[in-house]
Image: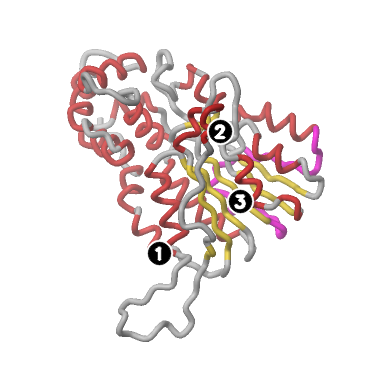
Amino acid sequence: MNATINLEKHFPVLLNELVSIISPLYGGTFIDCTFGAGGYSEKILEEISNNVIALDRDNSVKRFSTKLQTKYKKRFKFYNLKFSNIDQIKDENIKAIIFDLGYSSNQISDLNRGLSFKSKGKLDMRMGLNDFSCDEVVSKMSQQSLYKIFKFFGDEKYAKPISKKIVKYRESKKINTQSLVEIIESIKKNKGGKNKSTKIFQALRIFVNREISQLINGLINAYTILPIGGVIAVVTFHSLEDKIVKFFFKEYSEIKNSSRYLPKNASPKKYFNTTKKKPIVPTSSEIKINPSSRSAKLRFAYKLENGCDFENFISNFNYLINIENLRFDV
């Protein structure tokens, strides 16, 4: 996933737009599923009738959560938890559940974590509570598995030759961040636009952190614990994330019939109300302050009904979940 970043300062993307959607002045509990540096949480807590429950799988953000805990006492709670496990949160007064799927500047700028192609040394990319690192992926996955990861998670045109060269290179040398970048650049010669390594690093981050299944399960479980009338708001940073979120809201906010010649269902249900068809995007002034916000898209929907089974949602993206479930081959 791309990041909400500025290497000097962290800027929570689309903050004003998000606040206007969740209407924090009405009071209640708000769940910040991707706490990061705490930008959204801190803004919401400015209203004294608001409480925030924040989650983050990255335990290093505790220095930010401790600051808010000290300042806001009982109104703020933090859990080192993947947001796919949001159903463990128990609160009857939830007003909104927020997902910001970008990486924070603090995570990207920590070059030891290997999240960026500017990092040094060992490939890591773990965000916390992981089963394996990126180093293990490039060292142990088969060429075919690497190809699928790069193709479907990075939409990388050169997935096949890059995966082939990785397997060849590791026969004699250990692959680190610098050598992976060199492999990619040797294949993608004279290509303009964004950095040549962007898509491969995106794909590896998604696979290492199981971001597809995290997002799918996180959205479903957010719906499960959210009272009717509450809102789910999601900020995405690349097309694959946005595709999943868009389908999730659209599929269950429209009433469909199997045939136009058949009568409507006796009791048709819409599970969400989406007041906007198109996503909210950053203004030109925000992009000027924080260029990395340019790819951000904010989608949101209000819950109308309980009882959705999300069968179509899961089946539609099952091919991506299957790629995340690939195992090491060597």
User: Residue 114, which numbered label?
Assistant: none
User: In this rendering, which labeled residue sits more in front, label 2 or label 3?
Assistant: 2
Q: Nearest the camera: 190 or 110? A: 190
The answer to whether residue 329 shows anywhere in this view is no
Span shown in magenta: 71-94
Residue furthest front as drawn: 284
Q: Name the residue under label 3.
A: 97
In magenta stretch: residue 104: no
Q: How far is disc 2 from disc 3 in space, using C-alphas?
A: 23 Å
Q: Which residue is drawn at 41% across and 31% down?
A: 132
- In primary-sequence order, the first of circles 2 and 1 is 2
> SS of the residue at dot 3?
strand
Query: Vertical placement of 10 versus 281: above or below?
Result: above
Q: How far is disc 2 from disc 1 in space, using C-alphas?
A: 38 Å
Query: Vertical placement of 162 versus 257: above or below?
Result: above
Q: What residue type is labelled 3?
A: Ile
